[in-house]
Image (cartoon, grey):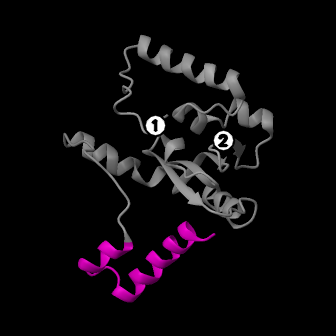
Amino acid sequence: MSIGPVQLIVLGFRHPDFHGEVIAELERLRQSDAVRVIDALAVYKDAKGEVEVEHLSNLSTEEAIELGSKVGALIGLGIDGEEGLEAGAALGAEAAADGVQIFDDEQAWDVIATIPDDSAAALLLIEHHWAVPLRDAIARAGGFRLADAFVSPLDLVAIGLVTAQEAEMLDGLERASATAP
């Protein structure tokens, strides 16, 4: 079975309501064949930087531990506490023993550090099914990924994809959420 390109998206929230629209949209994406939400976590960080993790899915706790703790394993945050962290480390060691090159500490992305204190984040691990044929065609042509990133709405004005007014509105939505008390 071929897996599509997988992306980790980290979205910040000052006052999240992960049980309403976000959960509904995750369910809609799951029903779509274009993308698959492999896993989703809510990470709450209090004013002192203490972290609390909650699974964002319709899986039971047991299913989340067995099937859906991929984000936690990827970033070193076990949904099943210390046991989950140890299980993730064991899988990484097994992959390294099989000759898979695991990135080093300099290449690591400290996702938890990017979440401001007294806020929360939704961590979404998404597989892009639509991109499998494109990725395979690129590989057959000898191509490979050098980098990827989301582009700011403000940068889209310069290339004519959105108007300045649209970009300001979209950017304002993002900034308002980021700075709301």
The residue under label 2 is which amino acid type? Val
Give x and y (percent) for residue 124: 57, 50
Identify the element where label 2 is drawn. strand
Q: Give the class, few, some or many, for how many residues have Cα within 10 Å of label 2's Cα (few <14, many ≥20).
A: some
Q: Give the class, few, some or many, for how many residues have Cα within 10 Å of label 1's Cα (few <14, many ≥20).
A: few
Residue indicated by mark 1: 2
- Report the magenta residues as a range: 153-181
Q: Earlier in the sequence, mark 2 or mark 1?
A: 1
Does 98 sit left or right of 18 as displayed? Answer: left
Question: What secondary structure prevails in the magenta region?
Answer: helix
Give x and y (percent) for residue 177: 57, 70
Give x and y (percent) for residue 95: 46, 18
Q: Nearer the viewer, residue 147 or 5?
A: 147
Does 104 sit left or right of 32 as displayed? Answer: left
The residue under label 1 is which amino acid type? Ser
Residue indicated by mark 2: 51
Image height check: is 28 above or below 175?
above
The disc placed on residue 55 is none
Give x and y (percent) for residue 21: 70, 67
Residue drawn at 54 percent across, 66 percent down: 178
The quarter of the picture where residue 97 lies is: top left
Q: Nearer the viewer, residue 136 or 108?
A: 108
